[in-house]
Every structure is written in C-alpha cells, then in structure tokens.
C-alpha cells in the first residue's frame, strides 16, 4: 500500500473537511481525468484498487498518473479499550480529497476506453466523480 517513507510527526489532527480545491484542479499531464465532486478521505487501499482497475481495463496501454498520495495518518485504538490512555497507534494513511480535485489522469487511449476505465475506477472510490477532458 502507499504510505510515506518518513513524516515530520507520527500522528496528526483530523483537520477540517470541506472547501473547494485550489490545487490539483486542472488536467495537467494526461488528456482525460477523474475529478471528485465531494469532500472525503480516500485511503491507500482505495487508491490502489482504483489504479488496478484502470490498468487492467486498459490492458497496460497508455499512461496513468495518480495525482493523490496518502500522507495523513489515521490512528485507531484496540477494541474494548477504556476511555483515556492516550491516542492510538497509526492504523493507515489517507488523502483528504476536496471537491474539484483531479485524482487520476490517463493518456494514450481513445476517449471511450478512457471514460470506461475511469468510470470503473470511480466505483472503487467513496466519493462521487466525473470524467473530464483537458481544455
């Protein structure tokens, strides 16, 4: 799974959700992209599942860019743990997605194949998505 090699701090605050995306809002590398319409945390497992679907459907043709990387640690405590006793250990990593972010880009495919591949990838993600073309 995707995770950072090194972080400045082991654990982080949850932070605020919402607001519109200012960065990652244009298709920069490929011809087609998958754009989020909601705010959500996307885990490294979900990012990998969507990448696998795109790769499998395109039969390893074209080029794929993953524009998001899970850098935010999420902690969890064991079951039946009493209140208090500090914050739990890092369980997994997520990427906080905002509305308007381009998450995946593809190049070197026909529009029909790219649209179908990105729609299949959108089923693996917990956020509503839209297929977009480069302007």
Image (cartoon, rainbow, N blue to C red):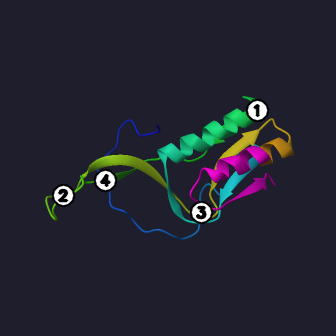
**For numbered disc 1, what is the local secondary structure?**
loop
How far apart are the alpha carbons under marks 2 and 1? 49 Å
Using the numbered discs, state the Cα–Cα distance from disc 3 to disc 2 in whole angstroms.
40 Å
The reply, left or right, for residue 55 in relation to residue 96 is: right
Q: CA distance from mark 2 to mark 4?
A: 14 Å
Q: Is residue 72 located in the magenta-colored stretch of the structure? A: no
Q: Which residue is mark 4?
A: 75
Q: Nearer the viewer, residue 80 or 135?
A: 80
Q: Position of residue 121 (x, y in %)?
A: 66, 47
- Mark nearer the N terminus (3 vs 2): 3
17 or 114, which lies in front?
114
Q: Which secondary structure lies at badge 2?
A: loop
- According to the picture, the residue beneath numbered tag 1 turns out to be 62
Q: How many marks?
A: 4
Look at discs 3 and 1 and give the one toward the viewer: 1
Q: Which numbered disc, 3 or 1, marks the residue that appears first in the sequence?
A: 3
**Which residue is rendered at x = 61% and y = 65% of the image?**
99
The quarter of the picture where the C terminus appears is bottom right
- Residue 81 is tagged as 2
Mark 3 lies on residue: 22
Residue 31 appearing in the image? no
Q: Which residues are magenta?
A: 116-135
Viewer-nearest of discs 4 and 3 = 4
On the image, the x and y values in percent for residue 129 come to: 67, 59
């Amino acid at each position: 799974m995707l995770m950072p090699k090194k972080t400045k701090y082991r654990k982080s605050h949850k932070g605020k959700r919402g607001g519109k995306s200012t960065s990652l809002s244009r298709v920069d590398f490929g011809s087609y992209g998958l754009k989020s319409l909601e705010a959500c945390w996307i885990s490294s497992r979900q990012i990998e599942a969507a990448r696998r679907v795109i790769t499998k459907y395109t039969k390893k043709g074209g080029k794929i860019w993953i524009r998001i990387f899970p850098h935010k640690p999420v902690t969890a405590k064991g079951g039946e743990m009493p209140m208090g006793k500090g914050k739990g250990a890092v369980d997994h990593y997520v990427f906080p997605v905002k509305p308007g972010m381009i998450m995946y880009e593809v190049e070197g495919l026909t529009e029909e194949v790219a649209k179908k591949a990105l729609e299949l990838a959108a089923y693996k993600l917990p956020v509503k998505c839209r297929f977009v073309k480069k302007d």
